[in-house]
Image (cartoon, rainbow, N blue to C red):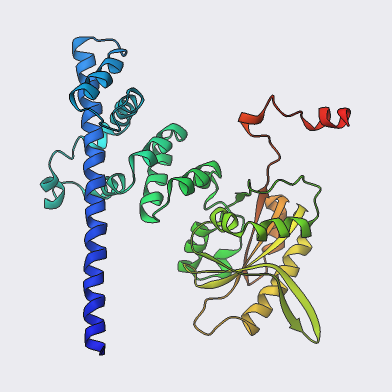
Amino acid sequence: MNKNYLSFIKEIKRNIVHSRYMAARLANREQILLYFRTGKLITEKIELERWGSKVVEQIAVDLQTELPGIKGFSYRNLMNMRQFYVEYQSVIILQTLPAELQSGSILPSLAAELEHIFSISFSHHLLIISKCPDPTERTFYTRKAADEFWSLRTLEHHIKNRLYSNQGKLPNNFPHSLSKEIGVHALNVFQDAYLFDFINLDENANEKVLETEIVSNIKHTIMALGKGFTFISNQYRIEVGGQEFFIDLLFYNRHLQCLVAFELKNGHFKPEHAGQLNFYLNVLDDKVKLPHEKPSIGIILCREKNNTVVEYAFRNITNGMGAATFRTTRSVPDEMKGILPNVKELSRLL
């Protein structure tokens, strides 16, 4: 097979993949509009006829009679459609005809918001509505889920981790250590607080045990860190002047195009942590960073921090770094509460 033939096959493959993607997008768009219109019809009819909300149960039964085996129109889902209509009517109600959006008669900002709404599943919307009462927060998660192709599980994780409130608030020295463009991107990548709820350790566990748990659950760790992270190594070895030093966690971020060193501190942030991390970043830039990559960034992950102390510790450091907190969980799942004894009761029994 010559190169022309291989190129031809790849072109057909691209067309197939693109066509399937567009078909899936259009199908999802139609489903969202169908659920919206159904919620609108039911809500308006109930208000007009002054029916009680219990009529929705009868509507669900009658729909099953008219369309035997139909899925997605149970009583619960019909109520979800009503809620979806109520929450998004001010936006979607303007989308009366697909041609209206294509013609550009809708404001660009509204058109972009509509595209985000139509790009994620109805299940994504229900999760956002149930967990995010603030409209601005909803818009944030809708946009992120659409732009970054979040699964429902990923969306749930970021909402639980309070990405909306934590993003952009990391104490850092980016303004005077990174270019303006990179600094803005870095603030969007890193968070002020991380939830490692896949780790079940108490606060007295040593840093080595914590690191082992993080690496053992690296898939969950990458999900917790956010977009674009690729794991390189833990206890990454660097040599300076015949001495060995080890970086707790080393990642690469595709969006920032730089190495990212994480130092774990299972306690309060201390000023000397900044000096240690600065040393590591100097070595990484001199000995590990590739010519086309941006300067390395370091993040100190600690249990607690005082932002004023962090600010003074970072002030005259020229390498980009920040300090974030993390927390794990020892809580018992709700479904197990009342079945298993708590720690104090178990100790008493033993």
Residue 277 vertical position relative to residue 74 in the rendered view, above or below: below
**Left or right of 141 on screen, residue 286:** right
Q: In this image, 114 relative to 195: left or right? A: left
At x 51%, y 78%, the residue is 293
Q: Quadrant of residue 124?
A: top left
In front: 10, or 205? 10
Residue 91 visible in the displayed image: yes
Q: Is residue 108 visible?
A: no
Q: Nearer the viewer, residue 108 or 287?
A: 287
Image coordinates for residue 297, horizontal then vertical, percent: 60, 69
Asked if 326 appears above or below 47 in the picture, the reply is: below
Q: Foreground residue, 44 or 169?
A: 44
The C terminus lies in which quarter of the figure? top right
Q: Residue 12 in the image: state x and y as whole percent.
A: 21, 72
The residue sitting at 25% across, 37% down in the picture is 91
Q: Quadrant of residue 162?
A: top right
In the rendered view of the protein, which quadrant contains the N terminus? bottom left
The total of numbered circles placed on residues is 0
* Location of residue 268 in the rendering, given as x and y in whole percent from the top left corner: 77, 51
- Pick the front one: 157 or 110: 157
84 lies left or right of 209: left
Q: Position of residue 38 (x, y in %)?
A: 22, 28
Image point 69% across, 52% down: which residue? Answer: 308
Q: Which residue, as the protein is rendered here, is positioned at the far front?
A: 68
Q: Residue at horizontal 56%, vertical 45%?
A: 161
- Residue 289 position (above or below residue 216): below
